[in-house]
Amino acid sequence: MASILNTYRQPNWQGMLAYGGTAYVPAAGNYQFATANFNTAKTAQQTIQSLTTQRQNLQTQRDSALQSLQSATTQSDVQKWTAVLQTLNSSISHIDAQIQQVNQQVNLQQAQISAGQAVYQASQREQLGASMLNGVERDLGSFSRVTGIYGQPVHWNNTNGGAANNITPMNIPSGGGVMIQ
């Protein structure tokens, strides 16, 4: 990821350390598939560039051999330059086939990367959904603990520090001078 950002002169992102000490680092799943696609395309470009250079060299040799064939005066020279031309044309065809193979391989790799990204995104959605359901379940569990006394007046037992497991009414003096806010 850092290499790609550097290629396009973008600032490097290594994450950050929050004030409370929590580290926030780049989430691999957010970058790994795009990085894989980038690397696949970059490798293919380099391979095709190398093959294209080889093809250009062979074409130059073929053009030279063709001129030699055209200026050949003996049957032996004609046969020799014809064989050379056939070999060079065969080599050029072979390189063309290799370029096609690289293109097919890139298509397969990108399809595989896309499928991997789809699986990753699905797993992230399911983890989020499970997390949310867990929160709902926890909330429902909390609600179920209070539903038995829901709507009932709160009672305090002043003798045991405010615990609500003994539901005796709170002892509020009825004499003057007491004010509850």
Image (cartoon, grey):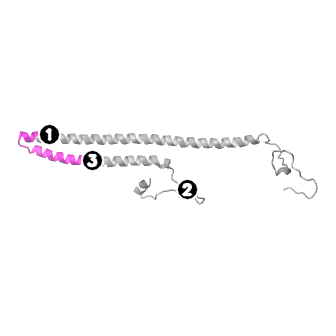
Residue type at the position of mark 3: Thr
Label 2 CA crowd tier, 10 Å (few <14, some 14–19, many 20+): few
Residue at mark 1 = 83
Residue at 53% x, 41% y is 123
Residue at 11% x, 46% y is 68
Label 1 CA crowd tier, 10 Å (few <14, some 14–19, many 20+): few
Residue at 17% x, 46% y is 63
In primary-sequence order, the first of circles 2 and 3 is 2
The percent position of residue 147, horizontal first and vertical second, equals 76, 40
Outermost residue toward the bottom? 19
The image quadrant of residue 106 is top left
Residue at mark 2 = 23
Residue type at the position of mark 2: Ala
**CA separation in Å, label 1 and label 3:** 23 Å
**CA separation in Å, label 2 and label 3:** 47 Å
From the viewer's perspective, is 1 left or right of 89?
Answer: right
* Prevailing secondary structure of the magenta residues: helix
The percent position of residue 21, horizontal first and vertical second, equals 58, 58
Is residue 130 positioned above or below 159 on the image?
above
Residue at mark 3 = 52
Residue at 40% x, 41% y is 109
Q: Secondary structure at mark 3?
A: helix
From the viewer's perspective, is 52 left or right of 163?
Answer: left
Stretch of the chain drawn in magenta:
54-79
**CA separation in Å, label 1 and label 2:** 68 Å
> Which one is in front in this view, the residue at disc 1 or the one at disc 2?
2
The percent position of residue 75, horizontal first and vertical second, equals 6, 39
Label 3 CA crowd tier, 10 Å (few <14, some 14–19, many 20+): some
